[in-house]
Image (cartoon, rainbow, N blue to C red):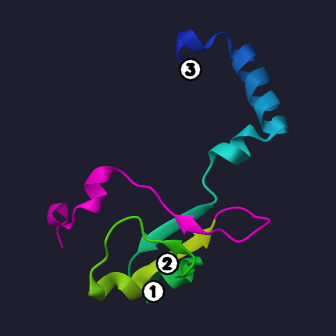
Amino acid sequence: DAPVAYGPHKTIYNRFIRWSRMGIFNRIFAELAGQAGEPAYYGRFGFKKETSVAAPYPLSVAYREGWQSVTLQEVLSPLRGAVSVPQPWCHPELWSD
């Protein structure tokens, strides 16, 4: 089901197929998932220590070794740079342990 404003189901289907063929969804979906957590736990799911992409928020010394990432789709060149997150994530005083 979809909202009426999206048009008839056939229109939605055709748009989905067209966008899929054009690669629009590949550009929309993230290429990398980042996570600050226990390496032994997240490593079981393919996460590895991240050194090329900076953490999007300040990490305490205790968590710096836990900044990890996993590639969600095949990428042609290594990812570099920074990740952006909602502003509240950048304020450690709002975090709770």
| Residue 10 sits above or below residue 44 on the image | above
Residue 21 at x, y = what percent?
85, 37
Based on the displayed image, in which of its 4 quarters is residue 36 positioned?
Answer: bottom left
Instruction: Quickly name the residue at label 3.
Output: 2
The mark that comes first in sequence, 1 or 2, is 1
Instruction: Quickly name the residue at label 1.
Output: 39
| Residue 33 sits above or below residue 27 on the image | below
Residue 62 at x, y = what percent?
28, 87
| Residue 87 counted in the magenta span | yes
Q: Name the amino acid, label 3.
A: Ala
Residue 77 at x, y = what percent?
76, 68
| Residue 59 sits above or below residue 77 on the image | below
- How many other residues sit within 10 Å of disc 2, few (<14), some (14-19) or many (≥20)? many
Instruction: Quickly name the residue at label 2.
Output: 68
The mark that comes first in sequence, 3 or 2, is 3
Task: Label 1: state its secondary structure.
Answer: helix
Determine whether, in the image, residue 10 is placed left or right of residue 45: right
Considering the image in quadrants, where does the C terminus appear? bottom left
Q: Which residues are magenta?
A: 72-97
The mark that comes first in sequence, 3 or 1, is 3
- How many other residues sit within 10 Å of disc 3, few (<14), some (14-19) or many (≥20)? few
Of residue 57 and residue 1, the one placed in the foreground of this image is 57
